Amino acid sequence: MRYLPLADTDRQDMLRAVGAASIDDLFVDVPEAARLGGKIEGLPDHIGEMAVERELAGLARKNLVAGEVPFFLGCGAYRHHIPASVDHLIQRGEFLTSYTPYQPEIAQGTLQVLFEFQTQVARLFGCDVANASMYDGSTACWEAIGMARRITRRGKAILSSGLHPHYVSVAKTMARFTGDEIEYATPELARESDAAALLDRIDGDTSCVVFQYPDILGRCDDMSELAARAREQGALLIGVVTEPVALGLLRSPGEMGADIVVGEGQSLGVGLQFGGPYVGLFACAERYVRQMPGRLVGMTSDAEGRRGFVLTLSTREQHIRREKATSNICTSSVLCALAFSMHLTMLGEKGLRQLAELNFDRALYAAERLSRLYRLRMINKAFFNEFTLSLNLREARPVVRELAARGILGGVSLGRLYPGERPLERGLVVAVTETATREDIDRLVDTLKELLDD
Amino acid sequence: MTDNPGGWRPQRPEASERSVATWTGNRALMLEEPLSFEIGAFDRTGVDLEPADMGPEVRSSVPWEGAVDEVYYEVRDLMRRQPIGLPGLSEPEAVRHYTRLSRQNYAIDLGLFPLGSCTMKHNPRLNENVARMPGFADIHPLQPVDTVQGALELIDRLAGWLVALTGMHSVAMSPKAGAHGELCGLLAIRSALEARGDAREVILVPESAHGTNPATAAFAGYRVENIPATSRGRVDLGALKARLGPDVAAVMITNPNTCGLFEPEMTEISRAVHEAGGLVYCDGANFNAIVGRVRPGDLGIDAMHINLHKTFSTPHGGGGPGSGPVVFSEALTPFAPLPFVEKQDDHYVLVEEETAGEHHGSSFGRMVAFHGQMGMFTRALAYIMSHGADGLRQVAEDAVLNANYLLRQLDDVLDAPFGESGPCMHEALFSDRGFAGGLTTLDLAKGLIDEGYHPMTMYFPLVVHGAMLVEPTETESKAALDQFIGAMRSVAERAKAGDPTLRAAPVHAPRRRLDETQAARKPVLVWKNPDRAEAAE
């Protein structure tokens, strides 16, 4: 086996050295009844490198690849072009095959990039500080709700109806066990978000208001008033961003007054990968830093006075605080954070702005053409690169399937995300990034026109 | 082993002068690298983008429908008016920036990485290749399930093999890493207990447990109590039995445990816990020691997470992404989280909120957006296929043999607190007993860095003073182990002799010891431009 360097002669020498007659002597502590012999049941025999490639390529071929068809899916995962250098750089063994940087003298590479990542995330989100990544956006969102509970010592979280329904599900699941109260209603196919309606719901029991921007239907609403009202009531505003590219064009939640901003970083550097691994972004105001979950990298100096970086404020973390830790997180998503940081560094201020404008332009073009169809209606008053159509006479779900049958991945039907919510079943969320060409958009419009008998 | 293989040790030490300062601060191949914020510029980019089809000039010439025109004006009110502060690098600068930084990291690719409990084994590059096949890497989690049948089949296949390897009943694939898997297991346990109207509030955890165990238990709403260990490094069965009662929801046990030892009374522990109405969670971080040789299901456990980034070789990436599927007993299966993959006739379906109602109404719900760490599943599956039913046992056997070899080659120079209690599993535990001159485990670890190694896990488990937990894994050759043993013996002897130079180690690393107190006292977590220099660029 090519991954196992020991030869049988080595094994014999080493067994002799440890005073064992056979390998079984080293497993004497295993209860006799639980010892297995021979081949493992239920698994095939090993195969070589070429055969593994062949077999997995066979499975891969059964999937419809996003890059090979006109593609318009979003709702929390976006297809952007990733510069070739990014993937090559994260595959350098020194990044790929290192551990969490517990020994900073020999981990400055990862630590410095994470420090750059924290700075980028904090600036992009308009916050003072950011951590070194979470698992993904949905878990970051839940951790932010828990953090707001610890800060305010209140247990009621109000979730905007525009929050990604999977994020809502995660919060509801966790709240059942922590005793938090979650206030949430499913969205309506309305032009504006529920920002204004939420204002009156914030009261003295509220720990936080969670507001997504752009939201699940692609709507963008200013959250400044929410921030002000939350502050008045002693609650926190948590901004959620599932499409960070939007912040190349739009003002950040932090700038609008959010106390904590979390998000999904998959858009930059990471790729779709059927939903994971992704990378959670987590930023907040400096005054809350000791309540943050996750790893933090800080700047310091070494014995010779050179600048260097270390993991810091670890007294918040499970390996020190155990049951009193701010989170149980250990391994997070560092390699994806590096990819995010690399992509953003290659874009820079100028590139990010251009990328965001290009997304907005393509989406405007698509919306302009689609909104001329008679049998649907565009919902949004505002959007960035994603908007929602309401089909007049049909459920969106079969339409999405029919589009797929014609080689177009045409969007996400809200029926999939909100099962059993009849008013939403006509909703089709269409995301248009820089990867969609004008021809792709035209093909979507023409095919949809035909399918809807428009 | 020769004392100076390849003649690497200097033959004329008087000729080596290592303290010559350079103008750049560089030391030949060890290149210093500023922050991207210090070398980048706001008008520089490493990405060429296509021009927009609908740029401002086009926009004014197109006959727009009112609705879309309005969108443009709405969004204009939300647009940024201030720069973000994100300097860019051109492509060659970026490649050099990250390549230089990468060289300041230690990695498995460079050498033995004996972090106990972390299982830093070789990361096969075949796995990287298959995970990047567009059919896996470039599919969206919300595509119609008919268009992702291959992905679902892959998840189903891996799930089936994990069940086979553990002898359990089912597996939840969505947890994102080990600690997330622990949470998944405890939430299922709590749901199962609540379903039978049994509100229990205590989780028992051995003193030697990973910090994630108590943190997870607290996160799941439980109170944590410790179970003591015996002098042989095992769970004290008598003390455990005495503590069991109607308030104990579960015990969380790591097996093989964090002292590197198998819990020989595991079956008895499970029986006692079950008799008292509780459930057994097993932390599977150390599954690598027993894969193919022992099925946890045969030991009576109810739930266990598997770190794909340990046992199944997916790269650790400097702190993730990981993946922590959780296997369940039959009793806990109905409570497993959504979503999961099921095969119905020849078709794979994704059981989500919508379809869960009929058959999986007891599920405790969703833990994460989408369906788990697909990129890690692909890698882990390729790893299992490469070893197969005929080869995976050898992984555990070689991992255990390597650790025992290290233990016995070092236990005359380092104190092995449980060395007398029989063979270890995949990791060997030592203490700092006998160190002189105030030298500590930390000093020994830093000395190992100078010898070209990543240190072992330090000060864990807490039950041993100055603990050093060494896990070589199965992917090290005997020659690599022998060289590590030589280095370890040398540093250990210095520590026992009270060699004061060890306190200054490392001297050959990219950085000397870093001031962690300064970092924590006045945390600097983001870069702040020192003056207006950046704005002037």
Image (cartoon, rainbow, N blue to C red):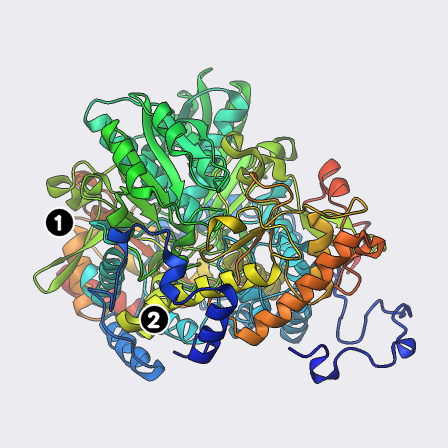
Instruction: Judge left or right: residue A161 versus residue B504.
Output: left
Q: Using the image as rendered, state which of residue A439 and residue B337 is in the foreground.
A: B337
Query: Neighbour class for label 1 at 10 Å: few (<14), some, many (≥20)?
Result: few
Count of marks placed on residues: 2
Residue shown at 20% from the left, 64% from the top: A41
Query: Neighbour class for label 2 at 10 Å: few (<14), some, many (≥20)?
Result: many
Q: Are marks 2 and 1 in contact (CB under 8 Å)?
A: no
Amino acid under label 2?
A: Ala
Instruction: Judge left or right: residue A85 versus residue B126.
Output: right
Residue A337 position (above or below residue A313) = below
* Pointer 2 chain: B
Residue B412 position (above or below residue A145) = below
Residue A377 visible here: no
Q: Using the image as rendered, state which of residue B420 and residue A109 is in the foreground.
A: B420
Q: Using the image as rendered, state which of residue A117 and residue B57 is in the foreground.
A: A117
The image position of residue A301, as x and y in percent, is 79, 51
Q: Tell me the element at label 1.
A: loop
Q: Splitting the image into 4 quarters, where does residue B97 fall? A: bottom right
Badges 2 and 1, same chain: no
Q: Using the image as rendered, state which of residue A107 and residue A378 is in the foreground.
A: A107
Residue bearing mark 2: B382
Amino acid under label 1?
A: Leu
Say which quadrant the N terminus of chain B sits in.
Answer: bottom right
Which one is in front in this view, the residue at disc 2 or the one at disc 1? 2
- Picture disc at residue B185: none
The image position of residue B208, as x and y in percent, is 50, 39
Residue bearing mark 1: A393
